[in-house]
Image (cartoon, helix red, strand yellow):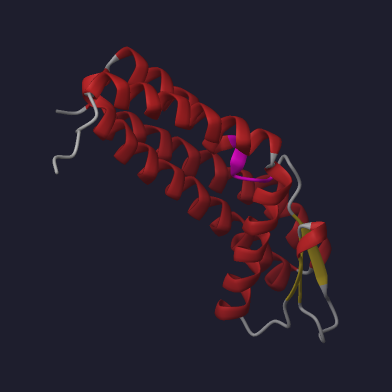
């Protein structure tokens, strides 16, 4: 019995549709994505720190410092999620695949690398914020971690992910 190998043009259309569906799904189901993302933050905080950590997934919140004098909860809001940095990558990947089908494989690899980098950078941002709260106290640590250093981590990390995406997708 012989298996039919899908034609490349059909496979590329499937990839374009799949990327578009995933991008749309992230927009529509960002709450579920944030729940997974904050749960990951809780796992990392629990593993890397001596904090008492608890995740309240239905509120997309991680509490840390439980049992100390300065407990704090961080809520993963729509503005703070990596989902909305991944969505443009998915859309660009779909457009690149539609316009240049021969680079589909490179685009998918680049997309995997860049999306992973964006998620890791967002987790690093959360860890940076927690570290600053621990070091500088709740008021100053949260202010500096959320407004300055956390933003710098996101901007530089997002830019590096975008550069990696373009380089990996377009190199020969």
Quarter of the view holding residue 44:
bottom right
Q: Position of residue 123 (x, y in %)?
A: 57, 58
What residue is at 68 percent from the left and 71 percent from the top?
135
Q: Please check the rendered image and state whether residue 58 is part of the magenta-colored stretch, yes or no.
A: no
Quarter of the view holding residue 29:
top right
Give the camera-side residue of 125 and 139.
125
What residue is at 81 percent from the left and 65 percent from the top?
73
Q: Is residue 136 above or below residue 12?
A: below
Question: Is residue 46 visible in this depiction of the protein?
Answer: yes
What residue is at 49 percent from the left and 45 percent from the top?
118
Q: Position of residue 138 (x, y in %)?
A: 81, 66
The quadrant in which the C terminus is found is top left
Give the camera-side residue of 81 and 58.
58
The quadrant in which the N terminus is found is top left
Lateral position of residue 14 relative to residue 9, left or right:
right
What residue is at 63 percent from the left and 56 percent from the top?
37
The stretch in magenta equals 80-84
Q: Is residue 32 above or below residue 171?
A: below
Across the whole image, how many numbered discs are drawn on residues?
Answer: 0
Q: Label the magenta part by its dominant secondary structure.
A: loop
Q: Please check the rendered image and state whether residue 83 is part of the magenta-colored stretch, yes or no.
A: yes
Q: Position of residue 21 (x, y in %)?
A: 54, 30
Question: Is residue 164 visible in this depiction of the protein?
Answer: no
Q: Position of residue 168 (x, y in %)?
A: 26, 35
């Amino acid at each position: 019995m012989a298996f039919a190998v899908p034609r490349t043009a059909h496979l590329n259309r499937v990839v374009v549709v799949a990327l578009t569906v995933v991008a749309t799904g992230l927009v529509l189901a960002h709450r579920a994505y944030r729940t997974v993302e904050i749960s990951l933050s809780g796992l990392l905080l629990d593993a890397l720190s001596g904090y008492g950590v608890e995740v309240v997934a239905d509120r997309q919140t991680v509490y840390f410092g439980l049992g100390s004098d300065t407990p704090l909860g961080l809520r993963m809001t729509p503005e703070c999620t990596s989902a909305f940095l991944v969505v443009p990558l998915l859309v660009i990947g779909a457009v690149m695949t539609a316009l240049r089908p021969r680079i589909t494989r490179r685009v998918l690899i680049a997309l995997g690398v860049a999306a992973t980098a964006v998620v890791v950078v967002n987790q690093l941002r959360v860890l940076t914020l927690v570290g600053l709260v621990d070091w500088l106290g709740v008021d100053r640590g949260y202010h500096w971690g959320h407004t300055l250093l956390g933003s710098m981590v996101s901007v530089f990390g997002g830019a590096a992910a975008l550069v990696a995406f373009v380089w990996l997708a377009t190199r020969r």
